Image (cartoon, rainbow, N blue to C red):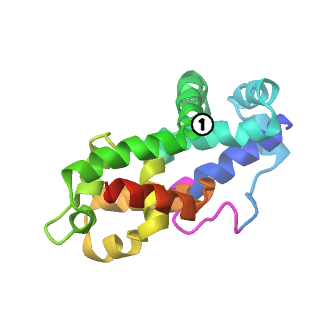
């Protein structure tokens, strides 16, 4: 991937994770960027470095990993990604490779402390599944898988009207298309954990 293409990927993914109306897949990564504007950037060296260092498919994963880790996507600058990006990408890759194992472990912990009905109950504020995510006991990937199984996101959107859930909800929706799993298989895993 050429440095300018890396820049376009960066802009498209940044837009995807920060703008509720922009969809990376729906708009086929389209962004308004020109070679002229790219050449004027003082940080174009970072895009050149990234383009040399990673294969094409790795570049998208590298950027996704860093946008997902960020608490404020709007503030993410490519220089910052270069500085802490390696660590974020390595941790993200490790999570992708052990997705099933992580899901089992985190589900065991969640359902050992809570009944299925109460896990997604938001009648008294943040439900246990959200509290465990915010407390770092459940990964974003596991939360996405739960949403693919139980479709709780839209219900939470209607019932939880607070900025904490709103930011988690946006991240959940934007990250979901990047997690390609066999939902039926994960349902089976969850059933065996709950019925233990």
Specify the principal SS of the magenta part: loop
Which residue is found at the position 63% from the left and 65% from the top?
A: 23
Q: How many labels does the image show?
A: 1
Q: What's the magenta region? A: 17-26
Q: Say left or right for 63 vs 31.
A: left
Q: Say left or right for 126 vs 150.
A: left
- Would you call the spot at circle 1 few (<14 residues within 10 Å), some (14-19), or many (20 or more)? few
Q: Quick one: which residue is furthest to the front in this view?
A: 196
Q: Is residue 104 visible?
A: yes
* Figure quadrant of residue 52: top right
Q: Which residue is under mark 1? A: 97
Q: Quick one: which residue is furthest to the left in this view?
A: 124
Q: Nearer the viewer, residue 116 or 129?
A: 116
Vertically, is 122 above or below 62? Answer: below
Which residue is found at the position 76% from the left and 36% from the top?
A: 40
Residue 56: image location, x then y, percent: 81, 38
Which residue is found at the position 28% from the left and 50% from the top?
A: 110
Which residue is found at the position 29% from the left and 56% from the top?
A: 129
Q: Quadrant of the N terminus?
A: top right
Determine if the magenta segment contains residue 22: yes
Vertically, is 60 above or below 88? Answer: below
Vertically, is 147 above or below 129? Answer: below
């Amino acid at each position: 991937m050429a440095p300018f293409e890396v820049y376009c990927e960066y802009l498209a993914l940044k837009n995807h994770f920060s703008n509720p109306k922009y969809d990376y897949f729906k708009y086929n990564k389209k962004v308004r960027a020109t070679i002229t504007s790219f050449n004027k950037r003082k940080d174009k060296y970072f895009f050149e470095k990234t383009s040399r260092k990673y294969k094409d498919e790795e570049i998208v994963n590298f950027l996704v990993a860093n946008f997902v880790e960020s608490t404020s996507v709007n503030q993410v600058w490519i220089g910052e990604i270069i500085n802490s990006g390696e660590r974020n990408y390595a941790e993200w890759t490790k999570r992708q490779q052990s997705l099933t194992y992580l899901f089992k472990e985190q589900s065991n912990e969640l359902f050992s402390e809570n009944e299925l009905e109460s896990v997604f109950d938001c009648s008294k504020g943040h439900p246990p599944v959200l509290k465990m995510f915010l407390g770092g006991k459940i990964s974003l990937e596991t939360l996405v898988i739960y949403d693919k199984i139980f479709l709780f996101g839209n219900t939470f959107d209607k019932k939880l009207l607070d900025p904490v859930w709103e930011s988690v909800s946006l991240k959940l929706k934007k990250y979901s298309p990047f997690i390609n799993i066999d939902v039926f298989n994960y349902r089976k895993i969850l059933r065996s954990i709950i019925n233990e």
